Image (cartoon, coloured by chain):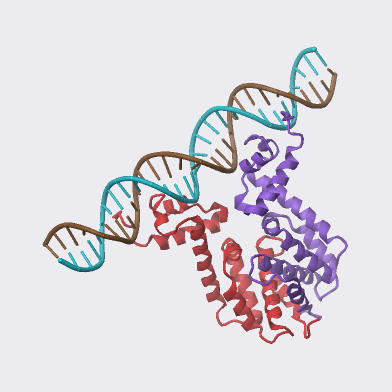
Chain colours: A red, B purple, C brown, D cyan
Amino acid sequence: MATYHHGDLRAAMLAAGARLVEEEGVAGLSVREAARRAGVSHNAPYRHFPDRESLLAALAADGLAQLEKALEGRSGRELGEAYVRFALANPRRFQMMFAMGRGAAMYERFAQAFAGSGADSKAAAAAAWSLVHGLAQLAIAGHVDQDEGFLRKVLGAMRFAQRSA
Amino acid sequence: MATYHHGDLRAAMLAAGARLVEEEGVAGLSVREAARRAGVSHNAPYRHFPDRESLLAALAADGLAQLEKALEGRSGRELGEAYVRFALANPRRFQMMFAMGRGAAMYERFAQAFAGSGADSKAAAAAAWSLVHGLAQLAIAGHVDQDEGFLRKVLGAMRFAQRSA
DNA sequence: TTATAGGCGTTGGCACTGACAACATTCATG
DNA sequence: CATGAATGTTGTCAGTGCCAACGCCTATAA
């Protein structure tokens, strides 16, 4: 036991990091604490991540991949609900993901899901994304009721305009 | 000159803090650096703010007040546009404000601005707020084009549903 | 089979931070 | 004026990110 080499420190750091972010918030993620939880010295992680920022970036990328998976195959109303559900299940991760992350893929997904919905499909996709994303943020922050029924009603309160104004 | 007492350290800290947040991001705000900029020792700020967190809270409250002022008297489309404009002018402040802040007053404002817009006015208000808030966030993060014309188009792409689904 | 190069982990150290304690200066109020 | 309360100051400590130097272990190839 207690082998000198960890085996898969990178993965262990991502796991520990994810838990730390969810428990303490982004500011609470320290490389040293994550290293401690991975059972490794305070400098070992730097072999896998050049700096704290890049650990965060990796966590964000990870989270985006999970969200992508959670949205797979869904569209329209279902897409929005799954998006919000994911956000509420992983609130701090979610906030972090879009604070740093590359959201191009997500935009793409919304563009496809809502192609031809409004006059300008790029704008329509952005609007749909904005609605669910904003709702997710406000619900996470507690500015809006998190009850699932209410959230559904909020999403249902908006329609695409038929023609651009 | 160089009086022992600063005169209005609290305000100076808020000013320095606001600049720091906008320049470096929330993580870049350190009590010590703000103290330095205010020309005061590293512990003086603790007479006015019990800890870093409470300095951040004060900054958030300040920002909310400014946003309230920027929205005063506006409603409907104008309200949304002013909201997004403020967010893009003070991106990091804005992100922080709603990560911590008490958003009840803002909800109230949207509720009044959109009273009777949809079947359920609470849901309608939340939807309107979500749309503009989400758009602001996505634009700030660069996930969506920041061009003002485009943003207007996005806001115009959504209508309230006449009856709840 | 063995030596050796490089990947991976370790210890040590530095500058910076948030926060506590003790002390100093100034301001208000009698 | 005197004295207590505000407000600032210096000193200190543990925790952090990151750099440098060194040690272990494993895969390769002679």
Near-viewer residue (A23 or A14): A14
Among the 4 quarters of the image, the one containing residue A156: bottom right
In which quadrant is the C terminus of chain B drawn? bottom right
On the picture, is B145 further left or further right than A4? right
Q: Quadrant of residue B11?
A: top right
A119 up-or-down from C2: above or below: below
List x then y, in percent, for residue C1.
11, 62
**Can you say whether B115 is above or below A121 in the image?**
above
Classify B111 as above or below B57: below
Number of numbered callouts drawn: 0
Q: Nearer the viewer, residue B4 or B43?
A: B4
Task: Residue at 69% x, 87% y: name it.
Answer: A116
Q: Position of residue D2 (x, y in %)?
A: 77, 13
Q: Quadrant of the N terminus of chain B?
A: top right
Residue A38 visible in the shown view: no
Instruction: Give the x, y percent position of residue C22.
Output: 59, 24
Residue A53 at x, y percent in the picture = 52, 57
> B140 left or right of B114?
left
- Residue A125 against residue B98 in the figure, above or below: below
Residue at the right extreme?
B73
Using the rendered image of the protein, determine whether residue A61 is visible from the camera's viewpoint: yes
